[in-house]
Amino acid sequence: MQTNVPEVAGAKPKAALTPNPGLTPLMLNHAAWVTPDAAATTDFYTRIMGMEIASTVLDDSIPSTGDDIPYFHIFFRMGDGSTLAFFEAPGVPPPAKASHPAYDIFNHIALQAKDRAEVLRWYEWLKSQGVDVIGPTDHKGLILSIYFHDPAGVRLEITTPLDTQWNCHTEKGYADLKLWEDCKAKARAEGRDVSQALVEMIKDVRKRYEKEA
């Protein structure tokens, strides 16, 4: 399905680009991270998260690149068949500290719960197991979420839609992207601080949410 994408200020010309031939991923197969402790990760995802081990791989080199890194690769299955996966490899040092808190906050994976009541059940269950939990947080009537970390430091979210059409707002998405890019381009052209200009624009946009509430 083709979508008409509006031109965005500051974007490079995109003449003669080949349109997508109708390929859209079917579902999440897996997302993968490094873990320092496969056993602790397994306990967390099976006992705490209620997921099953789906598959495992042992090898002494990476099939895609040929790098000589011995590893244990483990997958955990969710209700729809999609999986989360982890690699443990001996001798891998801890990851470098993020250069900005945004990386630790924004980089996460969200897992869907059935409804608001189930999100709250997750909150109580995780707290009872000593897991630090942030939330519940209502994202402007779009989704309700809680946040926490697994033993490898991966930030997780349990969420449920509050807006039944939350993932169908394509037109608004392109309009918001244009607003964002136009604001940045205008600020640069005027020699203004881009972050401050975006804050001012966001405050104006926030009025839209208040009116819709």
Image (tube, rainbow, N blue to C red):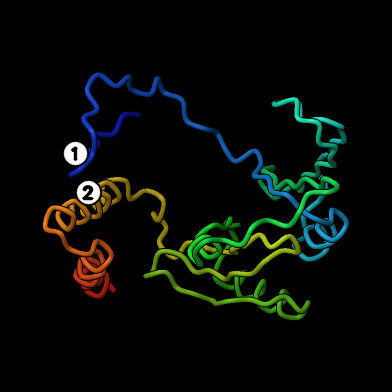
| Mark 2 residue type | Lys
- Pointer 1 and pointer 2: residues touching (CB < 8 Å)? yes
Sequence-wise first label, 1 or 2: 1
- In this rendering, the answer to whether 108 lies above or below 62 is below
Kind of element beneath mark 1: loop
Of 58 and 136, which appears nearest the observer? 58
Q: CA distance from mark 1 to mark 2?
A: 7 Å
Q: Which mark is residue 7?
A: 1
Choose top left, top right, bottom left or bottom right for residue 46: bottom right
Q: Which mark is residue 178?
A: 2
Which quadrant of the rendered structure holds the C terminus? bottom left
- Neighbour class for label 1 at 10 Å: few (<14), some, many (≥20)? some
Which quadrant of the rendered structure holds the N terminus? top left
| Mark 1 residue type | Glu
Of 200 and 195, which appears nearest the observer? 195
x then y, percent, for residue 33:
69, 48
Kind of element beneath mark 2: helix
Q: Residue at x 67, y 66 (%)?
A: 149
Q: How many marks?
A: 2
x then y, percent, for residue 184:
22, 55
Choose top left, top right, bottom left or bottom right for residue 152: bottom right
